[in-house]
Image (cartoon, helix red, strand yellow):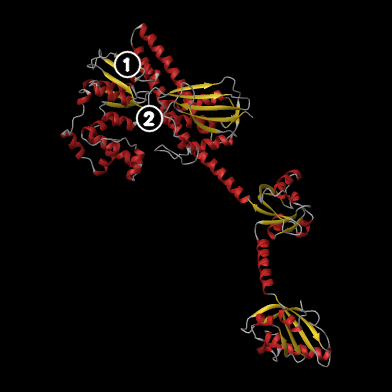
Amino acid sequence: MNKSTTVFVVDDDDAVRMSLEAMLTASGYQTRIFDSGAAFLESQRDCDAGCIVLDVRMPTISGLEVLKILKQEACRLPVIIMTGHGDIKMAIQAMKDGAFEFIEKPFSKETILGAIESAASAVPMNESVTPKDPALLRKIDRLTPREREVLDHLVIGNLNKVIAFELDISPRTVEVHRARVMEKMKATSLSQLVRMAIAAGLAPPTL
Amino acid sequence: MGALSLRELFDASVDGIITIDQAGLVTAYSRSCGELFGYEAEEVIGENVKMLMPPPYHEEHDGYLDHYAQTEEKKIIGIGREVVGRRKDGTTFPMHLSVGELGDAGSRGFVGIVHDLTLRDEAMNDSARLGQIVEESVNEIFLFDEKSLLFTYANEGGRLNLGYTAAELKSMTPLNIKPDLTTEEFNEILRPLRDGETDQAVFDAVHQRKDGSTYDVVVRLQLLRDETQPVFVAFILDITERNEARQEFISLQAEFSKASRVTIVNEMAAALTHELNQPLTAIANYLEAAQTFSALDDATAQEKALECLAKAVEQSSRAGEINRRLRSLAESGQTERQSEDVHVVVQEACGLVEMITDANLVVEVDDNIPAVMMDKIQIQQIITNLIRNAADALEGATGETITVRAELPNDEYIMISVSDTGPGIDPEVAANLFKPFATTKKPGMGMGLAICKSIVEAHSGKIEVSPNSGPNSEQGTTFRFSLPLS
């Protein structure tokens, strides 16, 4: 990403917002911070350069709602969703609503900078989902039936324990299948895996 | 009225009259005898009277006559006794037979007057059966004199449960077995019965056994006037079992409350874990920033690095504070009442749930509120529950407000209320709100408010719900509960 472009940080938690600003500034990014979705949506912003780092749980207007409004406004900035523990389903909903990626709090500098960097090189959010990429479908075909089942559960946001219960196997076995799925799909994060699943039309339309 | 002939008198008698000679042969047979025995006079006259008797009298009667003829020893003669008669159809009936002697030794005969006892026996059987039922009833049944109040009767159930003998009870009154009741109180209970204002008095009491132990009873009293001496009859229902069942219900409720506390603790733990992520994220960010800044050879950057480190330290205290709250929540498994600062109780409770709602959470605690004895966790459970309900009522709305207030309306109790500006509650729904399993929420068992109510009541307080009133609050709902100050 051209570091002269702007990272918009939207988070209602003062400490998270300001610490992100400090860290991104230290890393050479320009930042603009907003303490609510409303403040961000009302702001004057150039929608052609930069990316948005958006907290999913915020009072008044949630991250998911901000995302929907941006989509309606045809905003082309890639959106990185920040979630807390246990918000996977919300994160996956965000992905389906066009978010570029989600990262779980607390995250490392590498994770968020990596996400910002790949967002910069990615296509704008409304076009980020390429339906039925043949290479992707081939990767999915190489999964065993069990791995495929695990994938289906992962991309709807089920935790390992839940998957283990649903498939009547041990959580340890789920972990093994999950690792194999990630490897075969060449995904480095759950976020990427979900993006692929959405692209391949695997994730169900509603959660 | 002209003189009646002996014959007319004989036939008009309701009781049967039979005369026999000394051989036992029937010489006269009154009309009423026909009704008693089913034989016409022609069938009986001249026959041995034993035909009207079932065994063993039938076989023995001739012997009685011989015995009397030889010894003159009177057995039944002049006295009469209960015997059994035999009808023409072979059935028997109880009768009283009085026997008199006629004539003299030369032409001796006997007259028997037969009084049918069938009806009396039936009546006696009924009353005996009734008496048996009363006697054997496991309920305690007592009769006591209307004036002296001394027991005149106590059934077996009463005697066994109390441990007194019938003789002992005869010199006792109900006051002797009701230690909690004064003479005045008892007279006040009896008065409407004596005055005829009511037919029955029902009251709860405690009975004390001879051994000193006590048990809870419900007493039903009636005054029976159709006796020569009016008596009170008391039906006693031992409700120890019912009270035990109630106790069991209460302990079940406590269990349930505990279980729900566990659920709430789990929920709170999840919420706090989530909350913990915020300072952890900030710490990581500040430290990363500090690291990056400190690598720069620039005085301003060094300053910024130090600033970031200081902020990271601040955030670690924030994380520690959340952790402390989590621990105090998890440790409070037992219900314990202590004197608690209401400000702290309310603020902490609000802090636990402020993140579950988008609404503005306004907290107003009256500075004059003194410390109150309570189980802090239980009371916080109510407050968080009410806030949670308010948040659900406001779901999807923006710019709404939830107000949590603690007030001191008088010097007897404090009032804690949670108001929302939501759509309000249907009065029909409101009526059943505190009952278990009443819910309008899709994912909900409807136990929340029932538990709140049981907790408030365990603290001798009251909980109620009402629509908001006042000029600035046309809509919305307020839940309020009181906690007594002592």
Q: CA distance from mark 1 to mark 2?
A: 23 Å
Q: Position of residue B478 (x, y in %)?
A: 49, 28
Task: Give the vertical position of B10 relative to A116 (above or below).
Answer: below
Q: Amino acid at mark 1?
A: Leu
Looking at the image, the residue that sits furthest to the front is: B2
Q: Are marks 1 and 2 in contact (CB under 8 Å)?
A: no
Element type at mark 2: loop
Q: Residue at x 57, y 19 (%)?
A: B367
* Res. A189 in view: no
Q: Position of residue B431 (x, y in %)?
A: 49, 37
Q: Which mark is residue B472?
A: none
Q: Does label 2 lie on the same chain as label 1?
A: yes
Quadrant location of the C terminus of chain B in the rendered image? top right
Looking at the image, the residue that sits furthest to the bottom is: B106
Looking at the image, the residue that sits furthest to the left is: A134
Q: Which mark is residue A85?
A: 2
Closer to the observer: label 1 or label 2? 2
Q: Position of residue A183 (x, y in %)?
A: 25, 35
**Near-viewer residue (B454 or A155):** B454
Label 1 Cα neighbours within 10 Å, binned few <14 / some 14-19 / many ≥20: many
Look at mark 1 in the image and give the residue it sits on.
Answer: A24
Chain letter for the residue marked with disc 2 in the picture: A
Left or right: A63, with B211 as reference point: left
Task: Give the vertical position of A69 relative to B296 (above or below).
Answer: below
Quadrant of residue B144 within the rendered picture: bottom right
Left or right: B36, with B249 as reference point: right
Q: Position of residue A144 (x, y in %)?
A: 23, 43
Task: Give the vertical position of A122 relative to B45 (above or below).
Answer: above
**Near-viewer residue (B254 or B153):** B153
**Near-viewer residue (B380 or B10):** B10
Give whichever of discs 1 and 2 has the lower sequence position: 1
Element type at mark 1: helix
